[in-house]
Image (cartoon, helix red, strand yellow):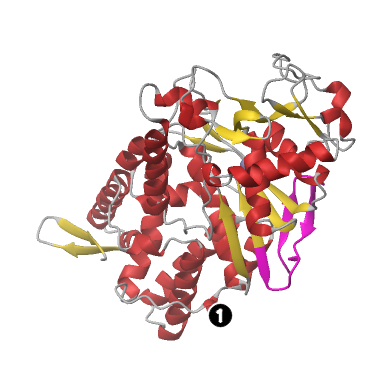
Amino acid sequence: MALELFDSKSQTLRAFTPLTAGHVEMYVCGPTVQSAPHLGHLRSALVYDILRRWLMVTDHTVTMVRNVTDIDDKVLVNAGSRDWREFAKEIEQNFDDAYLALNILEPTHKPHATEHIEDMINLTKKLINLGHAYQATDGSANVFFDTASWPNYGELTNQKLENMEGEEDATFGRKSPNDFALFKAHKADEPDTAAWKTPWGLARPGWHIECSAMAKHFLGESFDIHGGGLDLRFPHHENELAQSSAAGDRFANFWLHNALITISGQKMSKSLGNGVSVEDLEKAGSWGAIRYWLLSAQYRSNLDYSESSIRDAQAALDRIVGFLKRTTNTKQIEIDDQYLPSEFAEAMDSDLNVPGALAVIHERVRAGNTAFDSNNQEALKLCVEQVKAMVHVLGLTFAYQERRISEELTNQVNDLIQQRNAAKLAKDFARADQIRLELEEMGVTLKDMKDITMWSFNG
Ligand SMILES: [Zn+2]
């Protein structure tokens, strides 16, 4: 089986074949650096990190572009009285810190919108020349994409122009409320540093044109995969596609959209005040557990955050790490991809079914623990190599180095020890043995003292 991905433009599962054999080019919409990262940002970055890692394991080289939108209405507003550039840098650092902590690979290119204004001007000029964009009818430096001139507008999200509501604010020299800004005229109350000389006057770019221009700069007129969160599908990605295809580019061959994060079943939103910050996550568990949790739902399913989410993930991760710690030298980790089980590869190939892939890891951990207990060295070695290789593909190897035993796991262990002592008291030795095995599977070693049972996590 080969990789299949759900292309959200055609709304079908398609066999993935790169445009150039053995090489994949990806563009992923990065953050608008307007406020600290939240769970949704982390999930989105991680989904494409996993895709990239899987492509690399399956013998592709990958060029990945993830932009930074460092000029935007909200960047200027949220900077308040501070220099917006300094503010944007600081927020970008928050994102980079979180990406690093989560073990998300650095993109091949990380362009900043402000470094590509010339590319955006050139693309806009081209669209004007082709009759798909116009300078504002009020004579300002606003430039709009002319949606009525582009019959394919709406193709990404399967909408018809006549059914779209457009923006309520149809002023500033816009011909139609559906037309969107390519450049925005400098406003007197905005800093001079946030305006660039353009053929239409002092202006700054609109958000959508930034991605079209940067994608073209690094990946050319066509590339394999465009990714981003479902919340970006419309209007952002629809507009990117319209601009680039109206300028004559083929643009992305596959469109991937990851679903969102809900908080206790509710949409995450500022107005509900239910946002979860990076600090909240760090309090709940290790970064390994945070990564594990973010991977625990397939990327097209919503992922719900509740109070126990990270604790549960930590307990599941502890079972894997506990197994590796007691069976291998985790200081020297050698990985051999040829040990990847075919069930694992099938799950990954099936539109990145990471929950399915995690299930294979746990199954091999159980088999490995059984082999360990029965001293079956050959079976054990195979399981260890398989688990190491799978953990590596999911970018969780760093979790070996982290040790944090969850409160839940501690309670679980204490509970099982009590049950075992009760079984021994009742002379039910079979039951007592069974519990001991269960604990060993969790990576727990017991030491029976005179009147107390000590236990430790194998590390
Ligand atoms: Zn974008």
Reply above or below: 157 against 136: below
Reply above or below: 267 against 312: above
Q: Position of residue 432 (x, y in %)?
A: 31, 60
* Near-viewer residue (241 or 411): 241
Q: Quadrant of residue 208?
A: top right
Q: Position of residue 314 (x, y in %)?
A: 37, 50
Name the residue at 85% across, 40% down.
130
Name the residue at 75% across, 62% down.
16
Left or right: 381 as drawn, with respect to 267: left
Q: Which residues are magenta?
A: 2-24
Marks counted in the figure total 1
Residue 17 painted magenta: yes
Q: Amino acid at mark 1?
A: Gln
- Which image quadrant shows ligand 1? top right
| Residue located farthest toward the right when viewing the structure as drawn | 151
Q: Which residue is mark 1?
A: 338
Q: Quadrant of the C terminus?
A: bottom left
Q: Position of residue 354 (x, y in %)?
A: 58, 56
Q: Quadrant of the N terminus?
A: bottom right
Reply above or below: 10 against 400: above
